Amino acid sequence: MKTTKLCIIAFAVSASFGAMAKSGHETVSDKVIAEQRQELAENTEGEGFGPQSPRDIDSTAGSNTLSFNAAPAYTQMNLCNIHFHKNAEHKGGEFTKYAGNGDGHGYQSGFQYAGKLSAAELAPVKGEICPSKHGDVKPGDTIEVHYVHTTAQVEPGATLGSCFNDANKNPQLRVETQVYVVVNDSAALDFEELNEHEKKDGVHQAINIPKNTGKPIQYAGSTTGPSYNEEGSPFQVTWSVRPKVAKVNATSVAEWCEGNAFDEDHAHGVRNLVVNKELLSVISN
């Protein structure tokens, strides 16, 4: 789940701009990623940070002992934000192919679908999909969608600041996570339908989160986003990450980015995978 540097209530969308790794610009070396991880370790050591995200969901290991109560089921919480990252922030399940180090600021990195796609699914579509200064989304790309929920009494809205209000500055947070593969196929899932939401049983809900993509891996973690590559996130988040991907129609992704309740119009960058066991919780489910 993306955030910028710590704000008391609002999280602004990260504004870090880096090189376009797939446009002929150099990507950063392994040394740069190693240095970022070392900075993260040094900046969190002895500071009391809880477990961090993202992580390899296929590995249950972790030695961070800071615990907090798991958030309620998302059906008992308010949906407050939906956004997505290009390439999966998490690793595991069907998304284990490393996209590379990228630009060092969270773009052109992360993990991709490890399966095969047909030539028809990979065929280009007319126009750009969710373009930004970091590029656009194309058929064949992997995206990780975060359906963010809060125990605060709020309305769904733009940025993660919509998950907080003056009456509750310390709500429980849960992120229901689904990784999708963007394909050129009108019969694939419709992204606008997947992100539909309504008030149900008194709480705002994303009503079409897939239910056939495997048992979610639940773990205790934090907010994500590349602004935390070198420092710890202080926010406590219960994650539910589905291990199987679902295919989504590329045209519908473009249409969602053209206008939605969350003011989202592009894919966000990814935080480096957290591999330091002292910054990871044990996965017990």
Image: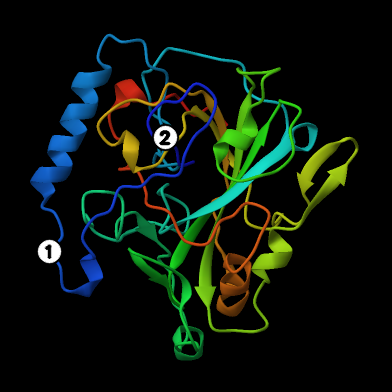
**Residue at position x 29%, y 27% in the image:** 231
Q: Mark 2 near mark 1, Cβ–Cβ under 8 Å?
A: no
Q: Which residue is mark 1?
A: 26
Please indicate whether residue 235 sits to the left or right of residue 133 in the image: right
Q: Quadrant of residue 217?
A: top right
- Please, what is the three-letter code of the amino acid marked with disc 2? Ser
Which residue is at a point 61% across and 29% down the rendered structure image?
A: 173
User: Residue 60 versus residue 197: which sits nearer the camera?
Assistant: 197
Residue nearer the viewer, 278 or 229: 229
Residue 270 in percent (x, y) is at: 37, 49
Q: Residue at x 45, y 42 (%)?
A: 2
Is 20 on the left-hand or right-hand side of 14? left
Residue 263 position (above or below residue 183): above
Type of residue at label 1? Glu
For the point 36% across and 19% down, the residue is 63
Q: Is residue 274 visible?
A: no
Residue 230 vertical placement versus 79 (above, below): above
Earlier sequence position, callout 2 versus callout 1: 1
Eye-nearest disc, 2 or 1: 1
Q: In this image, 122 relative to 253: left or right?
A: left
The extreme right residue here reads 201
Number of numbered tags placed on the structure image: 2
Q: Position of residue 98 (x, y in %)?
A: 30, 58
Element under label 2?
Answer: loop
Report the front residue among 172 and 164.
Answer: 164
Mark 2 sits on what residue? Answer: 53
Question: Is residue 139 placed above or below 35 in the rendered structure?
Answer: below
What whole-number distance in Å separates the C-alpha atoms at marks 2 and 1?
A: 27 Å
Other residues around mark 1 within 10 Å, as few (<14) / some (14–19) / many (≥20):
few
